[in-house]
Amino acid sequence: MGSTAGKNWTEEDEKLLLETIDKWVENEVKPIAREYDQEDKYPHELVESMKDLGLFGATISPEYGGMGLPASVYAKVIIKVASVWMAPSGIFNSHLIMASAIERCGTDEQKTNWLPKMASGEFRGGIALTEPNAGTDLQAILTRADRNEQGYLLNGTKMWITNSMYGNCLLVLAKTDLNAKPAHKGMSAFLCQKNEGYEVSKKLKKLGYRSIDSCELTLVDKQVSSDALLGGEEGRGLQQVLGGLELGRINVAARGAGIAEGALKMAVDYAQERETFGQPISQHQAVQLKLAKMATRVEASKLLVGSAANKFDSGERCDMEAGMAKYFASEAGVFCSQEAMRIFGGYSYSTEYEIERFYRDAMLMCIGEGTNELQQLIIAKQLLERNKG
Ligand SMILES: Cc1cc2nc3c(=O)[nH]c(=O)nc-3n(C[C@H](O)[C@H](O)[C@H](O)COP(=O)(O)OP(=O)(O)OC[C@H]3O[C@@H](n4cnc5c(N)ncnc54)[C@H](O)[C@@H]3O)c2cc1C
């Protein structure tokens, strides 16, 4: 895309962008998806085309060189990518969660130093929160950041970190005060470059979401300067990363909706080609019932994603809406890919068809950005808070 500096997104711009994404997905993502997934091969060439498309700056403000997409448009981009191959969306999604934390919470200097390079894709990042012993319960992390003359010394192990091998920077959550009570008051976030002290201990083998570098990472006496402390103030790290989760959840919801839509499309096509008892299986009522349930969930997911994104764009609090969208759309992804597997019968089990990848990829959406169990707790808590008896 061309320069978007100072841009207000009109319907025409949105249409043009989505057509460009359609072409990219059709011409560059779809042709390599199956081979790369099966070989767990990183799609370096897609990273280059993502740079050209401006996707690394999709939600970064134009003043820092990004496209400044509203969440509602960004979610449509994600749905399109995930309806063909969910994994590559993680390359710019995790990166943009880091960028959003810098834009929301960084000092002016951090914004100027990091965001233009992130928007162009020169810096490609992610977020390093989870540890071997702590995912949902982030206050239990053990990574520590000890003050020294040059800034902070980071030590610890991070788990499942997307973009940690092929990216070149991360936002790392660590403890600056091990004895703080409550624990989150002793937690801080650091902008780290991939250099001395940053070691990828292993690339993790996964059921799905293959091709993407989800790794275990060790930080061994990793020296960062004081400027690396996000927002320049200790004790705000957990709030800073959790503050980005509404957008993160809308992203994951969009990925779930995309998986659901892609699985439905494959099932509809296959059901009209495959014949049993002298007619296409689409004519059997049992198959039609599946298609109807899938199509309804796809539509409902997209509506929930759109409604949460619109609320986010209007600046309103939307943790309940983003939680509902994430919960429903990710379960729709699982449901639709499972139902599509049944419609494909024995061929669903063959790697010659792509539906098995959707089935393997879908479950991750129920886990990432807060498990669906946690989403339900958030939804209920908000519901009760907004409707006090
Ligand atoms: C492929 C992949 C990529 C990932 N990428 C990243 C990344 O880039 N950066 C990053 O930081 N992390 C990443 N993660 C980690 C992910 O965010 C965590 O796996 C997730 O938050 C869950 O944490 P956990 O695995 O430790 O599960 P746990 O926290 O151990 O939870 C286990 C089970 O207990 C339930 N549970 C826990 N607490 C409660 C509670 N209070 N009430 C009810 N139920 C509860 C959970 O819902 C779940 O069912 C990734 C994970 C995967 C698999």
Image: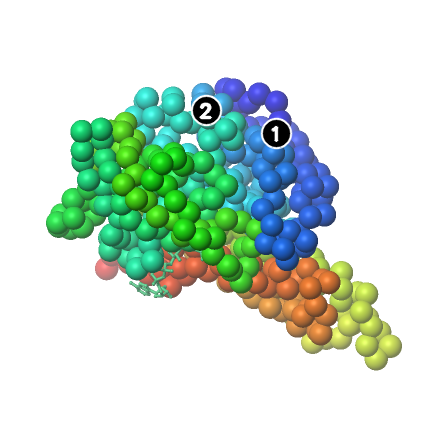
Q: Quadrant of the N terminus?
A: top right
Q: Is residue 331 left or right of residue 17?
A: left
* Residue at image location 76% in from the left, 64% down from the top: 270
Kind of residue indicated by mark 1 = Asp
Q: Is residue 271 left or right of residue 371?
A: right
Q: Which of marks 2 and 1 precedes in the sequence?
A: 1
Q: Is residue 246 left or right of residue 180?
A: right
Viewer-closest of 168 and 67:
168
- In the rendered image of this protein, does residue 248 appear above or below residue 388? above
* Residue at image location 56% in from the left, 66% down from the top: 335
* Residue at image location 80% in from the left, 69% down from the top: 274
In the current view of this chain or complex, which residue is farthest to the bottom?
277
Q: What residue is shown with label 1? A: 52
Q: Position of residue 90 (x, y in %)?
A: 51, 46
* Residue at image location 61% in from the left, 22% down from the top: 2
Viewer-closest of 358 and 305:
358
- In the rendered image of this protein, does residue 280 appear above or below residue 331? below
Question: Contact (CB < 8 A) between labels 1 and 2?
Answer: no
Viewer-closest of 50 and 58:
50
Q: Position of residue 70 (x, y in %)?
A: 49, 34
Q: Quadrant of ligand 1?
A: bottom left
Label 2: how many Cα within 10 Å (few below 14, some 14–19, many 20+): many
Q: Quadrant of the C terminus?
A: bottom left
Which of the 4 image quarters holds residue 98?
top left
Q: What residue is shown with label 2? A: 116
Q: Regarding mark 2 in the picture, which secondary structure is present there?
A: helix
